[in-house]
Image (cartoon, rainbow, N blue to C red):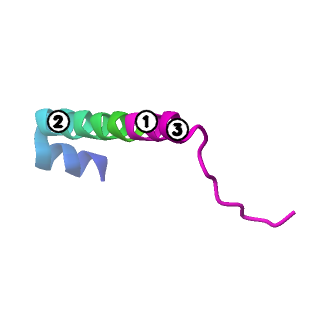
């Protein structure tokens, strides 16, 4: 499957896709960090009741 993707996109296209994925992750982390600083703590839903 990976070899088919390389043939379809070429190496340059895969580098661009990888770069977009990394940027997406950085934006998501920055958003979470801003929320954390704004609210003081992150509300994490509990999966199990104590």
Q: Nearer the viewer, residue 35 or 9?
A: 35
Secondary structure type for disc 2: helix
Residue 22 on image: x %, y %: 32, 34
- Circle 1 residues within 10 Å: few <14, some 14–19, many ≥20: few
Alpha carbon separation for disc pair 2 and 1: 27 Å
The residue drawn where x is 87% and y is 63% is 50
Give the magenta range: 30-50
Alpha carbon separation for disc pair 3 and 2: 30 Å
Q: Nearer the viewer, mark 3 or mark 2?
A: 3
Q: Which residue is mark 1?
A: 34
The residue drawn where x is 25% and y is 46% is 3
Residue 16 on image: x %, y %: 17, 35
Q: Which residue is mark 2?
A: 16
Mark 3 in CB contact with mark 2 (< 8 angstroms): no
- Circle 2 residues within 10 Å: few <14, some 14–19, many ≥20: few
Mark 2 in CB contact with mark 1 (< 8 angstroms): no
- Circle 3 residues within 10 Å: few <14, some 14–19, many ≥20: few
Q: Does residue 19 lie above or below 48 as drawn? A: above
Residue 38 on image: x %, y %: 48, 38
Q: Earlier in the sequence, mark 3 or mark 2?
A: 2
Residue 6 on image: x %, y %: 19, 43
Q: Nearer the viewer, mark 2 or mark 1?
A: 1
Q: Which residue is mark 3?
A: 36
Mark 3 in CB contact with mark 1 (< 8 angstroms): yes
Q: Earlier in the sequence, mark 2 or mark 1?
A: 2
The residue drawn where x is 15% and y is 34% is 11
Secondary structure type for disc 3: helix
Alpha carbon separation for disc pair 3 and 1: 5 Å
Secondary structure type for disc 1: helix
Q: Is residue 37 left or right of residue 1?
A: right
């Amino acid at each position: 499957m990976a070899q088919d993707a390389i043939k379809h996109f070429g190496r340059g296209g895969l580098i661009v896709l990888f770069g977009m994925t990394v940027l997406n992750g950085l934006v998501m982390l920055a958003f979470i960090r801003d929320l954390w600083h704004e609210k003081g703590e992150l509300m994490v839903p509990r999966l199990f009741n104590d």
